[in-house]
Image (cartoon, rainbow, N blue to C red):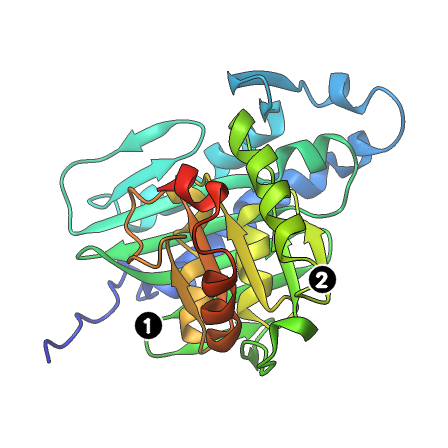
Amino acid sequence: MTERPALPVASDGSDALQVAVRVAQAAGAEIERRLPDTIGAGAKERLGLTTKGGWNDRVTEVDKAAEDAALAVLTHAFPDHEIVGEESGAHGGDSPYRWYVDPIDGTRNFASGLPHICVSVGLWAYGEPTVGVLLDPIRRETFTAATGCGTAINGTPVSVSDESRMEEALLGFDIGYKGPEGKLLLAAVADVWPGFQSVRMMGSAALGITYAGCGRLELYAHHYVQPWDIAAAIVVVREAGGIATELNGGPLTPESRSIAAGAPRIHEQFLEATAGSLWRASAS
């Protein structure tokens, strides 16, 4: 078996996982500074909420400020690495190390004062997901994972749920930004019901996947994701003993646009229960 290369090390001696934590903290500080603006009527105006890629794809001025702060830390630590930010696009030249940064996953939640958001910082090394850090600035939780190092919340090791029956599983989903697929998701959930215990709509794909990695959900699935949504969280899931694939069961890549992630037994049963659904077909 080919040995994985060691984590890259910055000039100050910090490894990539330590740097990723600092990157997330820099973005989180910008978010925390603006949390008072999320309270009460007029929050969307105070935060500068606007539409970007589609009618339901939103961005605030805080997203941009948080990404600027994150990228300043990351480019200083690893100036030769490639970086892809949700708001600013690709930076840097060709490198075997590619970082994905989402300054606020759950922007619509944030602008509505819903306390379910995160900063996501992921490193793919030589085409493989290698480091994942997700920071929830509201609950003050930092989820960390790196290949061979396991998954932790604020330093405490965690694992995926040990639930083996989907009838007892709590599943997470999101409708997403693509119109018809969301309707097909609701139909697929209705078809499987009551084959699981309950369902949650998260509003943050990265945090939903991460929750599946630490046992708060048995599984999270989505039909339309971007690389910065999944790059960090799938490391969390895999290092916690879980499985993460496309909805068709295939391997995840930066080009993947769907995901099913969580406890292995539940993942298997979920794919069996939704096989042949129009929802999964629409995501392939």
Quadrant housing the C terminus: top left
Assess disc 1: are there few (<14), some (14-19) or many (≥20) residues with their C-alpha within 10 Å of its C-alpha: some
Per the rendering, the mark at residue 171 is none
Residue 210: percent from the left, percent from the top? 54, 61
Above or below, comparing residue 96 to residue 150 in the picture = above
Counting residues from the start of the chain, the first of labels 2 and 1 encountered is 1
Residue 25: percent from the left, percent from the top? 55, 52
Assess disc 2: are there few (<14), some (14-19) or many (≥20) residues with their C-alpha within 10 Å of its C-alpha: few
Residue that sits furthest to the left in the current view:
2
State the SS at label 2: loop
Q: Which amino acid lies under the numbered mark 1 shown in the image of this protein?
A: Thr
Quadrant housing the N terminus: bottom left
- Specify whether residue 98 is in view: yes
The one of 276 and 127 positioned closer to us in this rendering: 276
Query: In the image, is 82 to the left or to the right of 119?
Result: left
| Residue plotted at (33% across, 55% down) | 123
Query: In the image, is 283 to the left or to the right of 3?
Result: right
Residue 273: percent from the left, percent from the top? 52, 62
The one of 35 and 69 positioned closer to us in this rendering: 35
Above or below, comparing residue 91 to residue 254 in the picture = above
Can you tell which of label 2 and label 1 is closer to the viewer? 2
Q: Quadrant of residue 166?
A: bottom right
Residue hosting label 1? 147
| Residue plotted at (42% across, 37% down) | 282
Residue hosting label 2? 194
* 3D distance between C-alphas at marks 2 and 1: 36 Å
State the SS at label 1: loop
